[in-house]
Every structure is written in structure tokens, then in C-alpha cells.
Amino acid sequence: MYRHSISAACALLLVSLILPSDLAHADSDELSGPSVTRIVTLDSAPAAQQAAPQDRAAARRMVSDTQRTLVDAAHDAGMTLSVRRQYRNVVNGLLVEVPAGQTGRLAELPGVAEVTEPVTYEMPERPTPVPKDVLAKAVDQVGHDARSGDAAPSGREIVTATDLTGVPQAHRRGYTGKGVTVGIIDSGIAYDHPALGGGGFPNAKVVGGYDFADEDADPYDDKFGPAAGHGTHVAGIVAGEDTHIEGVAPDATLRSYRVFGTKNAPTDAIVLAALDRAAADGVDVVNMSLGSTGNRSSSVLSLSVNHLVDSGVPTVVANGNGYAGPFNAAAPAVADGAIAVGSTYSSRYPFLAFTLDDGATAPVPYLDSGRAPAAPVTGTHPVAVMESSCAPLPAGSLDGKIALFAPYTGTDVFNCRVMDLARTAEAAGAVAAVHYDPSGTDPDAMPFSPCCDTIGIPVVGIRARDAERTKAAPAGTELTWGAYAGAPLTADAAGLMDAVRQRYLQLQLSSRHAIDTFVTGDVQVVGPENTEEPTVLSRGLQVRAVIDQSFLGEPSAADNVDESLARGMRIRTVDGVPLKLIVCDGEVAMLPLRGSGSEVDPSLVLRGGLANVAQALFDAVWERARPYGEPHHGIDALDTRILRLLLAGLTDHAVAAQVDLSARTVQRRIQGLMSQAGATTRIQLGWYARHHGWA
């Protein structure tokens, strides 16, 4: 509920001022073309927040008078102008809509200090959920391990606020945020979370707010927003309070101002509205995890932050999302009065690891398979080198041991893969399995996640050089879980991986109608599993992908592609995708600045005419690409999948690997299809399949 009323005169500002087309001084060329929005700031009266608290009501009235004068002047000048938003507290300004041809005339109106185009701000990355059992275990473990006595933080406290921050010490001195209200400008707050009040809105913890992204009174942090969960994540850090966590200020109350949603783009016009409302609501502190590196300390949003800070409201702003650095901070973190907050990246990529008691001190990094229980955080067991064979081992021969093996390379490779080998080890009593791939050219490369099915013991992959070290260790060498290791990153990669990944996901989630993308065979930054794809497709967007046929040869690639088809994506394949590319709504595109093979690609975002060129490139490649997964009739799902992969250019052996069959079985099924189609060659089979909707 609004804390202040809008007078009848101010309400008139929210009504579109449509002027007659036959005014003598209205240039018809100015009225042609699309309408655009601009933020107009005025210097004819200071923002209300710049006045003393007891004088702010009068200051707001003065601001409204100057804005009315501007609108009247625009009317007298024959301009077609509509007022979309009104800012009175943190800045004297309006968001207006005018024909593109009249934007140059805005600066000539009385009292105008600046006219700017709304800037879209970078969204924070969605947080990674922590399973409840993991959180409870962390609380319990930290609580038992903490120092004894009054100086010890509680388990639930140290989960979110460690001694490094000094927060537990502040709590012990009685500073808990009581009587303070924090305004969080973000993706909203899931106020039904037990740590954030629970129940409906408002409640005892989240006492107010507004959804500026979707224009309603409910600022709930739902799963559909492009930064879903982030505002709740921030709120928990700030003031969360339940049996599992304790935030920095557990006794503080919150107001939620949602600016990342599904209806309105997160522009500074939206963020200004949230700041303006926060000032009117009388919050004591403001937090914003957003920014734009294209704007400096003189931007309208930065100036608004300064006005808010000068009035006694500290404003905390993220230094930047992804790779910002101390000399490339984003606005409004660069505002003179803002408290800019950032984090540092390690120059090494972190891995979970184990140690060996072979006399060397370096830990061995590993990757979990994702198809088995996670590796434990503690425990020591002897390592046993296992033959790469799926022949049963004597019962109990690996009791209490960790089996180390390479992939099977015999003639029946498709019936004895990594997970089959791990099951053989499990049947012999092994408590875990470690696999590696000696066939690669890079001994420092981690092996691919294995396919298929699940297993009851942990399965992890290690580098070939670490496997050679383990095999060379003395008999009885033991492995201990619970270490960490790091692989070197280039200076760029330390920050750019997250930045590129985040920008890619943001483009998808901000799309309104269509997404077109090229998928190459060297997926690096975003990864083969696009976590936002289900959300995008569930919104009814048209999504098209042209896939390099080499990608289909990657482990589990065909499974991923079939899942995308089932969700409604249209897919075609081609021999050699020209580059990585995503085009959203035909208006925005992203492509790498470096060629293929670079460790991490810093990427370029294109708009306007350059985005149109990217769209034209995609359309041209789409037209010559081979359809993959069109509706089929007359054959079963497995044969359809085999045909798709063959038509995409995969060999019989590569197809067999994707469909979990032997090469001979695949060939027999192809022969059956040829007989059914009356074809004597595979070329005839391909022609028949295309013209009869088989693949």
C-alpha cells in the first residue's frame, strides 16, 4: 500500500498528452517513426530527499509543480509527449515517451538538466540452492567444531556470517539490526520462507515493498524471473532468522522492491522508481545487486544514490557482476556516496580433491560423475588398481578399497563402459571408484562424465597424469577424501567465465519472442547443460538451434538434444557451425571475440544493425541445415533416433555410443529400415526418410 497519496494535479501527469495532428508547428517528420522513452531530469527544484525531513512534503509539491510546467511547455510546443513515470524523492525527473523525431527537443524545455536513454542493468546470477540436509549437516558440524566459550559463534550463525566478517562479534555486543528497515532492490523476496517471516505478505519480517518489474503490489521472488532466488538469497544474508541460518542483522525488517521480473526490463527507469519508493517508505538502508559498466558517477541513477545517501540512508551496491575489477566498477556503485561491495577471484579453478600417502604433498583434483553418491568429505581407504574388464571379480576382492581403472577398450566396448566397470568394482566390495582416460592428448584434462545409469558407490574422474602417479605409488597406498585443489586459470578466465555465462543466461531470460543459437562442438563456458532452457521453453518462446554435427558425438549429447526436442525446441544440424552465437528477438546478439579453441571467450553483445546481421547469418545457415527430429510416422522411437544421428553425419560406431547399442545392432536396425523403405543404399534410405517424415 502506498504510504503517500498523489494529488489530483499530480495524477494528471500520468495521463498521456496526445496532441492534435493538425497543429501548425508540429512537424510531420517528427511524428513519424516509433516512439521512444527517455528519462528527463530537471534542475528547477531539488528532489524532496535533499530537503530536511520536516520539509519534504512541501519539496515534493514543488517538484510536482516544476514537472507540470515542463509538461505544459511540451504541450505548448506541439510535442506529443506521454508521462510514464514520475520521480520526486531521489531525483526531480520524469520518464516520458515521445516520437523518436522529437527527442532532440526535450532538452529545450524549461528546467531540463539532462535527457538520457534508459540503460538496462546487468542481473545478478541465480544462486545455487543448498539442499536442506547439507545445510543441517553444516550447522551441526560447525556448531560442534566451533571454539568453546563465549567467543564461539553458533553453528547456524557461522553458516552465513563468519568470524572473517566480524558479524558474530557484533552480535555478541548486541548489534542485531533491531529497529532498522532495509530496502532490497532485487528479484523480490520469497517471504513465505521460514527464515523470512513465513506466511503471506506483508509479514513480521518483510513489512512492505512493491513489484516494479511486473507492476503489481506483490514483490514475491518467483521462479520465473531472470534472477529468480537472488533477492531471497540477499534477504537471508541481511536478516534471515530460523533454526538453520542467522543473517547479519537478524532483528531487522525488510522491504522488497522487485526490479528483475518477466514484464519490464531492468532499466534505470525501473530502478529509479524503486529507489524513489524506498525513500518515500522511509527505509534506513538500501541494498542493490545490479550495475552497468557503461555509466559513470554522473549518471542519473548515481546522482539519485548520492541524494539518498546525503539524506542519511546508506546505500550498498554491488561493484559489478562477473568480472568487474577495481578499475571497471559499475554504476551506481561508482556513485560518490555508495558503499561498493565486491569479491575477489582466485587465479586457480577450484576442485574437490583427495590426498595420497605416497610421499608427495599435491592433492589430486577430481570431478564427481553425477550418476552416483557424492564423494565423502572424510575417510581413508587403500587404493587398488583394477583391470579394465567387466568380467566378475572374486567376491570380497576389493572389500574396503577404492578401485582405480581406465575405460575398457575391447571389441564389445558398448557393453562395458565406465559405469559398468564401476558396478563390477562395487560387486567386489569397493567403496568407491576412480576412473581416468589415458587416450587423450592432454594429461591434465579431466575425463567426461560417464554414461549411463546410476550406482551405489561414489564414482569420480581424475586426470591421466594423476592416475599414473597413483599407479606408481607403493602397494597399500591410501587415499583420503576431503582436500581441495586448484587448476591454473589465465588472468582473463579468472573472471570472464562467470561474466560470459551470466550474460548468456541473461539474454535467454530477457527474450520475449524468439531465440536462435548456434551450438558448436567446443561448449566451454556455459556448458552442455543449459540450466535455463526449460524455463525459456516453458514461456512459449520459439527456440531454434543449429548444431554442429561434431557436437552430437560428445558423450550424452544426443540425450541432451532429444530432451530439448521434447521441450519444443526446433533443431537442425550442419557440417561446421561458423561460430558460437545467440540471437534474441532479432534485436540482441552475442558472439565470441576470439576464435574456437581459446580457453575462455570474452564475448561481444551486438544490438541494432549488427544484431540484424547476426540474425541474417543464422537464417542463412538455418535454411541449408538438415532438420533433426521432425515428426515421424511408421517407425519406433529408437529407429527414429538412429536415423536422426545418421542424417546428422555420425558414423555407425558413434551412433551406437549414443543409443547404448553395439555397432552391429545399429547396423542390423539400419538394414531393417532399408528393407521397410525398399532402399538398396543408405542414400536412398535418407531420401525416403526425409520425404516420409521418418526423421
Image (cartoon, rainbow, N blue to C red):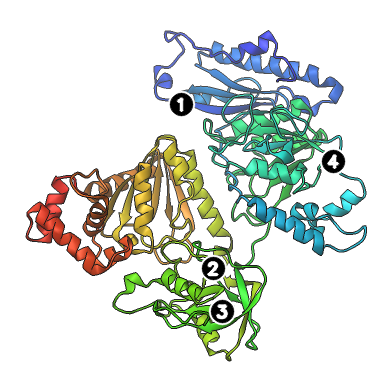
Q: Which residue is mark 2?
A: 457
**In the rendering, at what x and y percent does residue 208 appear?**
72, 28
Q: Which residue is mark 3?
A: 399
Regarding residue 552, the answer to whether it shows in the image is yes
Q: Which mark is residue 475?
A: none
For discs 1 and 3, the disc positioned in front in the rendered view: 3
Q: In 3D space, how far apart are the residues under numbered discs 1 and 3 (Cα atoms)? A: 76 Å
Regarding residue 614, the answer to whether it shows in the image is no
Left or right: residue 186 versus residue 583 is right
Q: Which residue is mark 1?
A: 100
Q: Which residue is mark 4?
A: 177
What amino acid type should be assigned to the residue bearing mark 3?
Asp
| Mark 4 or mark 3: whose residue is earlier in sequence | 4
Q: In 3D space, how far apart are the residues under numbered discs 2 and 4 (Cα atoms)? A: 46 Å
Mark 3 surroundings within 10 Å by alpha-carbon count, few (fewer than 14), some (14 through 19), many (20 or more): some
In terms of image quadrants, where is residue 574?
bottom left
